[in-house]
Amino acid sequence: MTKSILEIYTIEINNKCWFATTKSMLDYNLELTSRTVLVTGVAGFIGGALAKRLLNDFVSIKIIGVDNLTSYYDIRLKKERLKDLIEYGDRFVFIEASIANKEVVEQLFAQYRPSVVVNLAAQAGVRYSISHPDTYIESNLIGFFNILEACRHSYDGLKSGVDHLIYASSSSVYGSNTKVPYSVDDKVDNPVSLYAATKKSNELMAHAYSKLFNIPATGLRFFTVYGPCGRPDMAYFGFTDTLLNDGTIQIFNYGNCKRDFTYIDDIVEGIIRIMRHAPERKVGEDGLPIPPYKVYNIGNNNPENLLDFVQTLQKELVKARALPRDYDFAAHTKLVPMQPGDVPITYADTTPLEEDFGFKPNTSLREGLRAFVQWYVKSYLE
């Protein structure tokens, strides 16, 4: 069915309960029930998982999902995520389009008038940005600019407009910072990849639009997201493919890398809590708006050594009988130098997230990798 220039599909999911907290929850100022929420990048790893939770947890919510289904990685995974959403009727609308197409974005806002926008559409990957820079400019800069402009004009004619814009940033913005853990108060002016530069640009663009047009905006710096049906360009997925095909995995920086691995359910829980509390609009002493703008880290606050990570993955593969008990791990690993664009450590200071939302990601690496391995075995080996 085609309506105007937007191709539409309907989607639904089954209920799944998940909850975690470390203290009493914040007094939310934005109710998601009966809202129309735009989720860009909805067929992506985080976007698909977020759409599921929203549809499960908020009965009368309507999700407008946008994704251009690029072939950056196996498109079957994107279709699998969308397949999981089928049967929700008119509560979910899927539009196959690029947010870099300004006409599509403008019509989408005019047609559906979303009051909450979650921008997850982006070209991901640090190393890919070295060989394919154009795609990052198109999606991460032009695409995000189109979203910001649409949010700005959602207030035209004294309309209520967008109540909260949430957008994906990245731990990559910390670049060559040596101070750990990374705090949102740290200076982030030393990106070591174009991908990181585009994400820092997103934060600057959002701040400017928040200041100029009083748009409540929240940026989320994600730290190494992993889990079932994740991105195959991520290390844990690629390592699994390689080990199960009797190949040799490369461990960068000679094993001296640490990553703050964050399980997908923790990421989604953080996003939903943040969605429900928009930065408050205030006026400064000069009579001008104080930008209703915030940035949060969402990470596990517990960096894992890459060698330990690989050993945990191996144990879970053996436990799932995907690898034999006598598998020679040492014979299938090779220590290599750091690659351009990579950093030796990512480590999130999540104090603001804990203080403002009573939440801290807490899924252990073993628990998260076990869930991934179980999904992988079922999807690829059975």
Image (cartoon, helix red, strand yellow):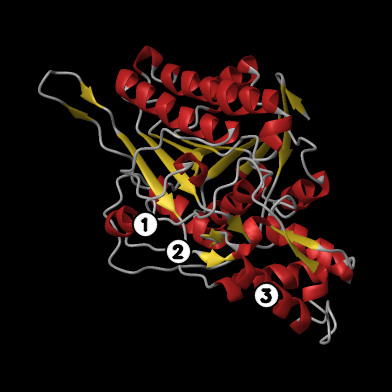
Q: Residue at x 64, y 20 (%)?
A: 104
Please give the label number shown on residue 350.
1
| Percent of width and height locating residue 279 | 30, 39
Circle 1/circle 2 CB separation < 8 Å = yes
Indicate left or right for 166 with 286 as reference: right
> Mark 3 — residue?
311
Q: Amino acid at mark 2?
A: Pro
- Of the residues under marks 1 and 2, which one precedes in the sequence? 1
Q: Amino acid at mark 1?
A: Thr
- Of the residues under marks 3 and 2, which one precedes in the sequence? 3
* Along the viewing direction, whichever of 243 and 110 lies nearer the viewer: 243
Element type where label 1 sits in the image: loop
CA separation in Å, label 1 and label 2: 9 Å
Quarter where residue 212 is shown: top left
Quarter where residue 125 is shown: top right
Q: Is residue 270 above or below residue 104?
A: below
How dense is the environment of label 2, judged by Cα within 10 Å: few (below 14), some, or many (20 and up)?
many
Q: Of the residues tagged 3 and 2, which is closer to the observer? A: 3
